[in-house]
């Protein structure tokens, strides 16, 4: 089973969640990452519509993929936490909160806004919960999981690997914009 999407953009989302959790958790606190597959009984459910996703491979082939539930990735921390009002505005463009010395003046306020957009483009959700200031936060990312027909899976993975950046022979120039000095190294 596979999440179908842009590997680099989805990695960006996970890195943003982890970076924020680490940045906003004081020394001695903890960050926990977990993942689980939520298998929906799509065949027997009258509430869930089984929508076939069609993907087009880099060489132009069209492949039908069936939904098989979701993967949920959760990033929890024991850090600064957030108020209900902060949670209600968290995913807006340019939002920053000054709740403690860890957050004050750091960041562009774009990371979670961009992450939510990427997740939405992949058919998923990104949510945040917190019991309040000083009580940590939990971010939950869900993405649909699809079954690619066995006869197509190997060929699709081989084709996709041809387009990975790490196989590029030309020199790449990157502009790194990050709100954490630690992440710019």
Image (cartoon, rainbow, N blue to C red):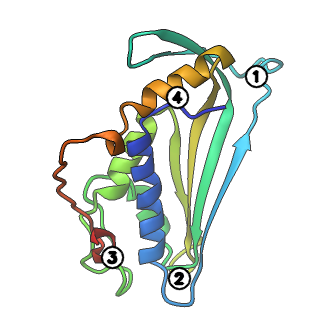
The residue nearer to you, when weighing 80 against 175, is 175
Q: Are marks 3 and 1 in contact (CB under 8 Å)?
A: no
Q: Distance between the residues labelled 3 and 4?
A: 33 Å
Q: Residue 80 at x, y = what percent? A: 48, 79
Q: Mark 1 points at which residue?
A: 42
SS at mark 2?
loop
Residue 184: x and y in percent read 27, 69
Of the two numbered discs 4 and 1 on the same chain, state the one appearing first in sequence: 1
In the picture of the structure, the residue carrying the numbered disc 3 is 182
In this view, the mark in front (3 or 1): 3
* Residue drawn at x 39%, y 30% as measured from the top left: 162
The numbered mark, 2 or 1, whose residue comes first in the sequence reads 1
What's the distance in space between the residues labelled 4 and 2, CA to CA?
44 Å
Task: Indicate left or right for 159 with 49 as reference.
Answer: left
Which residue position is annotated with label 4? 157
Residues at badges 2 and 1 in contact (C-beta under 8 Å)?
Answer: no
Quadrant placement of the N terminus:
top right
Secondary structure under tag 1 reads loop
Q: Earlier in the sequence, mark 2 or mark 3?
A: 2
Q: Is residue 129 left or right of residue 66?
A: left
Q: Position of residue 24 (x, y in %)?
A: 44, 77
Going from N to C along the chain, the mark reached first, 3 or 4, is: 4
Identify the residue position indicated by label 2 in the image. Answer: 134
């Amino acid at each position: 089973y596979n999440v179908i999407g842009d590997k680099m953009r989805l990695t960006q989302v996970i890195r943003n969640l982890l970076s924020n959790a680490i940045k906003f958790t004081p020394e001695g606190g903890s960050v926990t990452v977990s993942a689980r597959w939520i298998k929906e009984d799509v065949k027997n459910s009258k509430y869930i519509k089984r929508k076939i996703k069609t993907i087009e491979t880099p060489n132009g082939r069209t492949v039908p993929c069936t939904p098989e539930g979701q993967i949920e990735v959760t990033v929890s921390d024991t850090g600064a936490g957030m108020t209900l009002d902060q949670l209600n505005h968290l995913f807006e463009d340019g939002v920053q909160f000054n709740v403690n010395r860890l957050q004050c003046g750091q960041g562009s306020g774009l990371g979670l806004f961009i992450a939510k957009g990427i997740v939405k483009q992949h058919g998923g959700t990104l949510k945040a919960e917190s019991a309040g200031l000083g009580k940590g936060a939990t971010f939950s990312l869900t993405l649909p999981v699809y079954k690619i027909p066995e006869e197509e899976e190997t060929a699709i993975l081989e084709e996709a690997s041809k387009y990975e950046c790490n196989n590029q022979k030309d020199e790449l120039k990157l502009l790194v914009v990050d709100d954490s000095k630690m992440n710019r190294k």
